[in-house]
Image (spheres, rainbow, N blue to C red):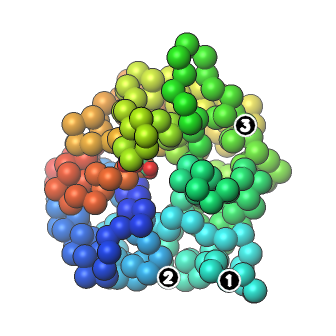
């Protein structure tokens, strides 16, 4: 399975021109890299520009989508709108949305259903807020995962992606300290086990698990273990706004042409 690298630009950059330039530089930097799947997730107003700048080589992601498909929902954007724009992936339940905007697991669940019915691949973000002090797995991961997937037909979840992002490791969070590769691998194994319980082995095995939180060119390759099935991709925030750095991250996981 090729590693999947998702660039979460969050509410950046400031203008269309910058977004276009950033996407074009990333595309240029990656033109000779093979064996990695890359998704750029810019803010909504830049999706069309980024799509043009990437000309089909890089996939397009959104940072959120509502659960209804149309109607009186001021400010919301529907999955079919995104699909028609050429978006293939959508990040749902990011900790910033959960924390700042009060997004709940139930809301994430509705969004996941709707994204799947519109043919988008949901990237469902889960992760604990506080770094544990003892070697106990925080219950947040299991709760968020179970609630976000509850009642969704198993077969449709083959297209789902889970992003494990400990909030304490996000570069802009208060603590903002990177986790270790060993910790990431242990969490990937733990999440895979939870998925097997929730979805059964066959479906669970098709779900990709990504790692996020202070990923840089220096540490990116370490989070993906080659010998056992651990993390299978990365969700990159701050470092994805620097085209040189992001290109290095992707190159470190792919192969040259
Ligand atoms: P970071 O952000 O790479 O800047 O830590 C990751 C994210 O929040 O998706």
Closest to the camera, between mark 3 and mark 1, is: 1
Residue 25 in view, yes or no: yes
Q: On residue 85, which mark appears?
A: 2
Give the quarter of the figure containing the C terminus. bottom left
Residue 192 in view, yes or no: no
- Residue hosting label 1: 74
x, y (%) of residue 250? Answer: 27, 50
Residues packed near mark 3 inside 10 Å, few (<14), some (14 to 19) or many (20 plus)? few
x, y (%) of residue 151? Answer: 83, 51
Closest to the camera, between mark 1 and mark 2, is: 1
x, y (%) of residue 87? Answer: 49, 73
Q: Sequence-wise, which precedes: disc 1 or disc 2?
A: 1
| Vertical arrangement, residue 31 with respect to residue 131, above or below | below
- Residue hosting label 3: 143
Pointers 1 and 2 in contact (C-beta within 8 Å)? no
Q: Residue furthest right?
A: 151
The residue at the point 61 percent across, 22 percent down is: 137
Residue sitting nearer the eye, 8 or 115: 8
The residue at the point 68 percent across, 83 percent down is: 74
């Amino acid at each position: 399975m090729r590693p999947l690298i998702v660039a979460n630009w969050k509410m950046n950059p400031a203008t269309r021109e910058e977004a276009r330039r950033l996407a074009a530089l990333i595309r240029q930097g990656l033109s000779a890299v093979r064996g990695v799947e890359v998704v750029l997730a810019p803010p909504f107003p830049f999706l069309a520009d980024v799509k043009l700048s990437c000309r089909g080589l890089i996939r397009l992601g959104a940072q959120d989508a509502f659960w209804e498909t149309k109607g009186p929902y001021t400010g919301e954007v529907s999955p079919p709108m995104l699909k028609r724009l050429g978006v293939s992936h959508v990040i749902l339940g990011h900790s910033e949305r959960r924390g700042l905007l009060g997004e709940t697991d139930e809301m994430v669940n509705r969004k996941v259903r709707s994204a799947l019915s519109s043919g988008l691949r949901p990237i469902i973000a889960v992760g604990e807020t506080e770094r544990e002090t003892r070697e106990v797995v925080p219950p947040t991961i299991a709760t968020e995962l179970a609630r976000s997937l509850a009642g969704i037909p198993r077969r449709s979840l083959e297209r789902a992606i889970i992003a494990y992002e400990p909030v304490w490791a996000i570069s802009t969070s208060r603590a903002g300290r990177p986790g270790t590769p060993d910790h990431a691998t242990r969490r990937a194994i733990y999440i895979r086990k939870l998925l097997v319980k929730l979805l059964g082995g066959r479906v669970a095995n098709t779900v990709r698990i990504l790692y996020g939180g202070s990923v840089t060119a220096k540490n990116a390759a370490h989070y993906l273990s080659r010998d056992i099935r651990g993390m299978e991709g990365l969700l990159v925030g701050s470092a994805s706004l620097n085209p040189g750095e992001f290109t290095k991250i992707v190159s470190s996981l792919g192969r040259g042409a």
